[in-house]
Amino acid sequence: MKAIKLASIFAVSAVAAAVSTTTIAAEPVFSGDAGLSYTDTDGSDGSYGSEGEVNIKIDTGVVYMDLDWESGDDGGFDLDEAYVTQGAVQFGDFDGSLIDSAAVYGGVDNGDDYVSDLSANLGVRYAVTDELTVAFEATQDTDNDGLAVAYTTDLDVATLYLSGGIHGDDGSAVAVGAEIPLGNAFTLAGYAQSGTTTADADMGSYAIGFDFAVSDALTLSAAYMEDTETDDVSNVEFTAFYTAGDVTYMVDYVDYSDEDTVANTREDFVKVSAVASF
């Protein structure tokens, strides 16, 4: 089995060498947010927070890195992505997996969904076409690995997403998602996923949501998310974004069916914030 794994990696590396590109010097691109928030949580006191964050992206044409620096006690540097591009091949540390890439449900702020990527975060990806990508994926600091695929197609009336893969000894998953524009201002989106975890337990989830651009300044989003393999585990979220000048004001409400205010886990909350970006 290990020989097969190594052979697959070497084969992709050979393809990468054959289609290698020239290194191009690139300046880092900085973006970020600054602002304040207040969160009122069931079962505990409310709390103020900073919305400060700096994002640094570096793309030389060969090496791509995405670095976040957040403020607050739980802040600090977080390297989201660091990968190499050689023609149609990319390898390194990606921000997630292809396995759950079909999970779409609109632009709510919190997005506490139940989709699974089987803990895959490293890999070698090959773009077969603009619509189809296949990958060898692995989990950092373990020997779990597997194969994944993602496919996207525009059907004019909707954009369809398919993704899935196998990972570890027992993990497997398949997901299908769709985004359906209904007019110029309203988009409906949703996904469903089914499979087994790397511990060979059944898992599944789905979500459905929408984005509604009421005006150039006001956007409303909502989503319902459910874990289909666990009784009474779901949540519903509503988010409103309003932009006035340079500042975006947000109100976000999340209601959990499995709220546990005693253990302070998955508590219902309302968050309001005011943020400016650059």
Image (tube, rainbow, N blue to C red):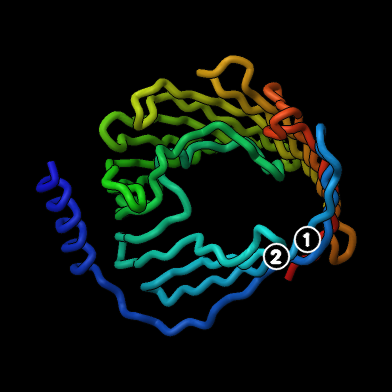
Query: Label 2, on which residue?
Result: 71
Q: Residue drawn 12% across and 41% down?
A: 1
The percent position of residue 75, horizontal first and vertical second, equals 65, 62
Residue 220 picture quarter: top right
Left/right placement of residue 87 relative to residue 97 reads: left
Amino acid type indicated by mark 2: Ser
In the image, is residue 156 above or below residue 14?
above
Q: Which residue is mark 1?
A: 50
Is residue 54 found left or right of 152 in the rendered image?
right
Numbered disc 1: secondary structure: strand
- Residue 221's tag is none
Between 141 and 152, the one nearer to me in the picture:
141
Q: Is there CB contact under 8 Å for labels 1 and 2?
A: yes
Spot occupied by residue 88 in the image (x, y as percentages of width and height): 31, 60
Q: Position of residue 15 (x, y in %)?
A: 19, 61
Q: Residue at x 82, y 46 (%)?
A: 39
Circle 2 SS class: loop
One can see residue 16 in this view: yes
Which circle's residue, 1 or 2, is located before the other in the chain?
Answer: 1
Q: Residues within 10 Å of mark 1 (few under 14, many from 20)?
A: some
Q: Identify which residue, 222 or 137, lies in the foreground.
A: 137
Q: Nearer the viewer, residue 103 or 78?
A: 78
Q: Residue at left 31%, top 46%?
A: 134
Image point 68% across, 33% down: which residue?
265
The reply to whether residue 214 is in sight is no
Tell me the CA gap for discs 1 and 2.
7 Å
Using residue 244 as the reference point, say whether residue 82 is left or right of it. Answer: left
